[in-house]
Amino acid sequence: MRRLFANLSCFPPAWAVLLFICFACGVNPEYSKPKQQTKTETIADLGALPRFVTDPVDNPTSPEKVQLGRLLFFDPVLSGNKDVACATCHQPEFNYAEFLETSIGVNGVGRGSKRFFQDPNDIPFVKRNSQSVLNTAFNGIRNDEPYHPESAAMFWDGRAKSLEEQALFPIRTFEEMRGHGYAEDKVLEGIVKRLNAIPEYRALFAAAFKSDKNPVNDGNLAKAIAAYERTLIANNSRFDQYMRGDSGALTTGEKEGLNLFLKSGCAKCHSGPMLSDFKLHTLGVADTPNRKESDTGGNKNYGFRTPTLRNLRYSGPYMHSGTLKTLDQVLLFYEDLAGGKIENPNVEMYQMDTLANQLNVKFKDIDRIVEFLNSLNDDSFDKSIPARVPSGLPVSGR
């Protein structure tokens, strides 16, 4: 091989032309070259979730903040048309997500898979699949690294860096909660005025933020919702118990699935206690048919953040576009991906993440890997819904 490259070096123009042809044809040499021996991750690359949540320095929790945040989360008063709450798309009974490919926000009616747009309608579907709020208190956590909740990646594109920052995005987004009633740069001002006009909310904000002269503001709105969301945790799955030392917490089949999960290369991205590296990866996932435009992701290169693998039983469909309905389909996607297949016709070979070529998911192993993934489920989280909200509007919206 060395002799071959030595000979080629005698003809630099031809070699340059060959490289030009490769890239012009959309061939990423790193992605398309034959598989090479790579590092196999071990169980030490995974981890149990912490038993307790870490709060940001500027937003320590309190019962008053949590109580306020819970009511705000379920109150459609935060939406432009007073028809959508945070809980509309993040439903307790569905793992604080929903069983839809992509969400229906403004002008929608119904719950979960039965939700639909009212007629007439000019509101598009929400751009991406609704991610679960559950365990987002642990977003960004990695093994043996300092954890900073004020800089934890949120959303499929990682555009928000904390739960506090994340909380205000849906309120400002046209198809999610804002609607036609407000301009994007005016909606938070309008929502704060609404809240200030409700005596019960004024009292709740004053109790939660005692040192503030004018506690009803968008910053405290975000802090209260984030404080509530940090109570929504499921950190005692059988996998967590196993990682904490209970060798009998997993069945023989689940342990086999864990070994195959590691051997297949899944943990190259799905690692750490949340089974996510929280990085953007370009994998050529198909676009949702619910939107006309192609979704180019957070880096405009079709990169999307690695999702957690926790509580997958309750949070389908999967991927940022919600186009894969079952875990079997997800693993078959990765088997095809390792073979060079790209599902999204808008993604070129040169854009693909080189880690995709290091996967080795085999059809015969899928059942066992799914068996392991099910050990990551934990339904012991808080599913309670308030009986009423201070606005008097329908709890969780229409």
Image (tube, rainbow, N blue to C red):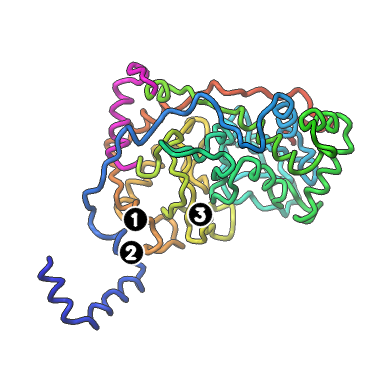
Instruction: Give the label, 1 or 3, closer to the camera.
Output: 1
Gap in Å between the C-alphas at discs 3 and 2? 22 Å
Numbered disc in front, either 3 or 2:
2
In the rendered image, residue 66, in percent from the top left (x then y), is placed at 70, 28
Vertical arrangement, residue 90 with respect to residue 268, above or below: above
Please name the residue that numbered disc 2 is placed on: 28
> Quarter-wise, where is residue 77 in the image?
top right
- Residue 56: which quarter of the image? top right
Res. 379 mark: none
Mark 3: which secondary structure? loop
Name the residue at 54% across, 20% down: 380
Give the amino acid type for the residue marked by disc 2 in the picture: Asn
Q: Amino acid at mark 3?
A: Asp
Residue density around tag 2, few if under 14, some if 14–19, many if 20 or more, within 10 Å: some
Mark pair 2, 1: CA separation: 8 Å
Q: Which mark is residue 287?
A: 3
- Residues under numbered marks 2 and 1 in contact, where contact means CB atoms less than 8 Å apart: yes
Q: How many marks?
A: 3
Quadrant where the N terminus sits is bottom left
Q: Earlier in the sequence, mark 3 or mark 2?
A: 2
Type of amino acid under label 1: Thr
Q: Nearer the viewer, residue 370 or 58?
A: 58
As for residue 127 lying within the magenta part, the answer is no
Q: Which residues are magenta?
A: 244-266
Of labels 2 and 1, earlier in sequence is: 2
Does residue 265 show up magenta in the picture? yes
Residue 189 % position (x, y) = 81, 49
Label 1, secondary structure: give it: helix
